[in-house]
Amino acid sequence: MDKLRDFLKSWPGRILLILCLSPLALLGIESYFQSGVDPNQIAQVGEASVGLSEYQTAVNSRRSEILDQLDDASLLNEDVLHQQVLRGLIDRTLLEQQAGKLGMTVSDDTINRLLRREDIFKDENGDFSNEQFSAFLRQRGMNKDQLFAEFRNQLSLDQLNASIVGTAIYPMKAVSQLIELQLEARNIWLHRFNWQDYQQQVKLTNSDIQAYYDANKDTLKSDAMVNLAYVQISPATIKVDSVTKEELQQQYEGYKQGLAVVDERKISQILITGDNAKVRADKIKARLDKGESFAALAKKESDDPSGADGGAIGRFNPSVFGNDAAAVEQALQGLSVGDISKPIKTGFGYQIFTVTEDNGSKVPSLDSMREKLTAKAKEYKRQAIYADKVTAINDLAADGFSIEDIAQQENVVLKRLKDYRKENNTSVLAQPAVIKQAFDDFTIQDQAVTAGIEVGDGTAWVQPSNYRPTQTLTLAAATPQITQILRQQKASALALKDAKKLAAGIKTAADINKQPVSFQALGELNRQTTLLTEKERSLAFSKQAADNGIVVLASETEMGATVIIGDRIKTQQQSQLSATEKSQTAAIIRDNLGQDQLQDYLDYLRLVYKVEVNEANMAGAQGR
């Protein structure tokens, strides 16, 4: 096993792991190699294809990987997942064909040499073992030719990938310049002109609105919306006021089983039978309480043959007592050596017990753990009730009940969301899984209640109505949106006019305090500051100031217009990177540039090789 782990950490081992087990590292999606071409194609890529089973395997693997990283499964966007997986498989197929066309291959000798170096295939003398190699192949259900073919394919892809990604150039001089830019700082004074302060001055005409509508009609679309009625439950919404003795005992038994404690107590008994058994048992208990010998009384009074041995019946074994085991165990609970139980009625008669020896582990009594066990019993009961309620609501939804009837029958709160959006959804049910179900064609057509959707630590059921698809807005419908856009644009232009006028009147630092508006002195800031917006950060470091001078900059920004005053830009020295850190930074930049080059190359290959997606199979695989 250690050899296998070491092999999988090696270069050829990682390749095999990629082929057989893990996510496809080259393109970032899950993939497994298939033998032959799947007749059920998802996509035709040049002369090759992406098979349906290959696609489904990749989707399932990628989904599992993502869900392992998510606390809330409803946050997974299935549409995006399917698109990314399909693109990754197509990209891989494109590269495979191009690698073959370019003659990028690896010889059998090279693969043999790589494999013969691996310890997993060596015997105790350090020599390559054909037996171990054969066992390795059998374990993975492949033959030597299949293994070599897949190795050769992956290594060819690696060659092509390296020839593209590994050729990105970003010189160290440029790295140093980039780092120095991040370390630049200057003292900054700021004044903002908010566009809202100018909107009353804006005059809009019908012709302004019409002109904007005509120029931007294709972008003025309504959002797809429904009205959504829903119910949502979670274990936290389930009230559990009390638990029974049986439920508490069940938790206690579970606790003891978890401890794996063996009851090593040896016990003795006095059994009393007959019509007056209870009266006799109470009298015997009274005599025991006065100090009489348990063994002596057992010999004299017990109706069980064990009385001859002083009542000794050996180690406590619950199975001996059948249905009375729980009652006997409760009577023995908490007893130390020499303690005597009260008389209890069992199927045998009335029994009195004493512990004569205890070599087992000490288990806390139920009473000492009552509070903790009660909390666990309530939680267990709460989860069970919650699971039953989820099943009940799912059954009602499947039977065609409306969301109103479900809420009433199951006594849950019915909630509503008006104008629930497919895009830009910021509601309390903005999770992709809910949106997908709410806008499902079947659900909308039948106005059906969906099956339960896991949302956080609970479940939601939704029923859409009044579906309004995306469509181009009429002039009347678009007018409020256009009015807002134009008002902000024109108000920002007025703000910028005042900003430029203010900036023109400032020549020296002494002029800052002479202006009719006040400036914020922000102190020394660098390019990473969060005190400025993105546009303001770009403006603040766009122009150098003269020695001992200032530069005054005015520009339209996110909130209207901004005037920024800065002194001379200087480079902070305390955060300088070492040569090693600069080299690492360069490597990261080059890798990012290489990935961009790879995407450009893939776009080129899409022009070279015809790519056709089977939309029907794709829709079927996505459950649409």
Image (cartoon, rainbow, N blue to C red):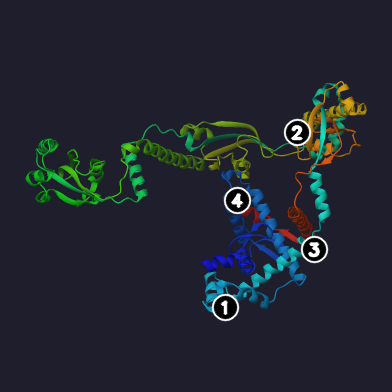
* Marker disc for residue 475: none
- Residue picked out by circle 3: 608
Q: Amino acid at mark 4?
A: Ile
Q: Earlier in the sequence, mark 3 or mark 1?
A: 1
* Marker disc for residue 128: 1
Q: Amino acid at mark 1?
A: Phe
**Residue 360: where, in percent of width, then height?**
28, 50
Element under disc 2: loop
Does residue 144 appear in this view?
A: yes
Which residue is depicted at the point 81% across and 48% down?
178
Determine the CA span between mark 3 and mark 1: 44 Å
Give the foreground label among 4 and 3.
4
Q: Earlier in the sequence, mark 4 or mark 1?
A: 4
Q: Earlier in the sequence, mark 2 or mark 4?
A: 4
Could you tell me if the residues under marks 2 and 3 are in contact, i.e. CB atoms within 8 Å? no
| Depth order, front residue of 218/375 | 375
Could you tell me if the residues under marks 4 and 1 are in contact, i.e. CB atoms within 8 Å? no
| Furthest residue toward left | 300
Location of residue 81 with respect to 469 vertically, above or below: below
- Residue picked out by circle 2: 531
Could you tell me if the residues under marks 3 and 1 are in contact, i.e. CB atoms within 8 Å? no
Does residue 614 appear in this view?
A: no
Which residue is depicted at the point 19% across and 52% down?
314
| Depth order, front residue of 65/578 | 578
The number of numbered discs placed on residues in the rendered structure image is: 4
**Residue 573: where, in percent of width, then height?**
78, 44
* Marker disc for residue 66: 4
Element under disc 1: loop
Q: Earlier in the sequence, mark 1 or mark 2?
A: 1
Determine the CA span between mark 4 and mark 3: 33 Å
Element under disc 4: helix
Q: Residues within 10 Å of mark 3 (few under 14, many from 20)?
A: few
